[in-house]
Structures are given as structure tokens and as C-alpha cells.
Amino acid sequence: GVGMQDERWTFLMRAPLDALQPARRMPSGYRLRVYDESMADTLRQAHNAAFLDHPDFTPFSEGLWRQTVNESRSFRPHLSFVVCPEHSDEIVAYVHTAEFEGDLIATGRRQVCVGKLGTLRGHRGKGLATALLGRALHAYREAGYDEASLSVDSANPTGALGVYRGLGFAVESRWTNYVMTVDA
């Protein structure tokens, strides 16, 4: 060594879509909506709020969000969903979906990527992510995809890894994040 130590890991997880469990019902008091363009900045703000307590998270500016999410060729808005309280348009949970066309060429399988998934702090622990992602997985299968993938940080403080495993995702590979402390 050069003084670097492994600190945490990023897991690439994959789930086949051919034998899904029935999707869990949305918890009482909440409704599921298909994403539409009018939600673009509200979704960005929800994502920034949902990930504020995550290690090393940098909030998205409007420009960066527009470039990497809304205007990205890989974005699949018709397969992206939000959860709102029953009588509100506030986004309290969401799943942003992407498809990378090169995956089909490389693997021969239609793969969909769960790009971003989050639940705002005051709404966690109610099963929103499980119900939301379960419904998204069914929509992916209905749209003709073979499998879904996502990446998750091992330091994720919300228990996301357990949610993903419970929905049929398994770790396919992992990346190690290293740190080195240097004197100023």
C-alpha cells in the first residue's frame, strides 16, 4: 500500500422479471401516479430532499437534473412513477427509470435500470418503496423487459438493500470505494 483503506461498497443488483411476486398495495393515504413532464422540478426537489442524509450526496442543480434526467436519451418517463399523499401533488416517493440501448446489443436481453428511487424522510417505514418498486417491476415486465438492474451504496441509511432483496434483486457485482487521509 499507498495508505488507502476500503470504506464502503457499491452493489450492482439485478432481478429477473419472469416470475414476479404480486405487487404490494399502496399504503392507505397514498396514491401512485405515472410521471409526467409537469413534475420535472418537483421530482428533482424530492430527490434532493430524499438523499440529503446519504453520505457524500451532492444535490442536483436544475441544469444538471435537466441534462442527466429529463433530457437524457435513456430516460423512460412512461415507466417512471411517483407517490403522492391522497389529496396532494407533493412527491413523497418516486422511481426514475432508464434504459441503456447498448445493453440489448451487449447481452441480447432487454434490461431496464432503476436510475433513482427515494422516499422522503417523513414517509419512510410505511412500505412505500416496496409498493412503488413492485409496481414498477410489473410495468417493466408488461413493457417487454427481461430484467431490471440498479446500484446501491452499502452506506445507504434507509435499509434499501433489504427492500431490493425482498423484491427479487440479487447482488451481481460490487465496487469498493477507497479513502486515504492526508495531512493538509
Image (spheres, rainbow, N blue to C red):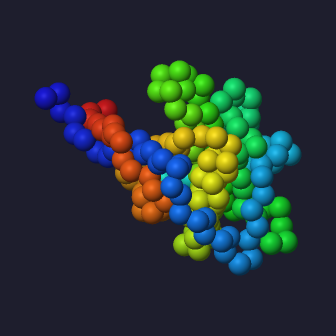
Q: Residue at x 54, y 72 (%)?
A: 125
Q: Residue at x 60, y 40 (%)?
A: 145
For the question of whether residue 15 can be seen, the reply is yes
Picture coordinates of residue 17 (x, y %)?
Answer: 53, 49
Picture coordinates of residue 36 (x, y %)?
Answer: 82, 46
Q: Residue at x 59, y 59 (%)?
A: 134
Seen as rendered, the residue at the extreme bottom is 28
98 to 42, vertically: above or below: above
Q: Residue at x 57, y 34 (%)?
A: 110
Horizontal side of residue 82 vs 160, given as left or right: right
Seen from the viewer's position, the closer of residues 61 and 43 is 43
Picture coordinates of residue 92 (x, y %)?
Answer: 69, 62
Picture coordinates of residue 48 (x, y %)?
Answer: 63, 49
Horizontal side of residue 161 vs 132, given as left or right: left
Seen as rendered, the residue at the extreme front is 18
Horizontal side of residue 130 vs 7, given as left or right: right
Seen from the viewer's position, the closer of residues 32 and 71 is 32
